[in-house]
Image: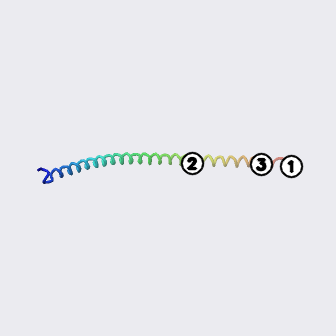
Amino acid sequence: MAELNGSGRLDRIEANLEKLTAKIDLMVDHHDAEFKTLMTWQVLMQDRFEKQVAIQQAEQARLNELSEKTDRRIAELVSAIGSLIASRPQP
C-alpha cells in the first residue's frame, strides 16, 4: 500500500537524481583539474616561447654583427687585391 501514494517512485527518482548529481560533481571536479593542468601548461609554454624568442633575437643580433664584420673584411680584401692588381706593371 505504500506504493499507492507514489512515495516509492519518488524515492527512486530522488535516488537517481542523487546519483546523477554525484556523477556531475565528479565530472566538474575532473574538468576543473584538467583545466588547471591545461592553464599550467599554457603558462609554461608561453614562458618557454618567450625565452626562445629572446634567445633567437640574441642569436640574430650576433649573426648580424658577424655578417657586418665579414662584409668589412671582404671589402678590405677586395680593396687590397684591387690595389695589388693596380700596382702590377702593365705588360
Residue type at numbered disc 3: Ser
Task: Using the rendered view, name the quadrant where residue 5 is placed.
Answer: bottom left
Q: Is residue 85 left or right of residue 69?
A: right
Total of numbered circles in the picture? Answer: 3
Residue type, mark 1 in image: Gln
Q: CA distance from mark 2 to mark 3?
A: 34 Å
Give the side of residue 4 with respect to residue 38, left or right: left
Residue 38 image position (x, y, % from top left): 39, 47
How far from the left and from the top, in percent, is residue 64?
A: 60, 49
- Image marks 2 and 1: residues in contact by CB distance under 8 Å: no
Question: Label 3's element?
Answer: helix
Alpha-carbon span between mark 2 and mark 1? 46 Å
Q: Position of residue 26 (x, y in %)?
A: 29, 46
Q: At 30% from the left edge and 49% from the top edge, which residue is drawn?
A: 28
Residue holding disc 3: 83
- Between disc 2 and disc 3, whose residue precedes? 2
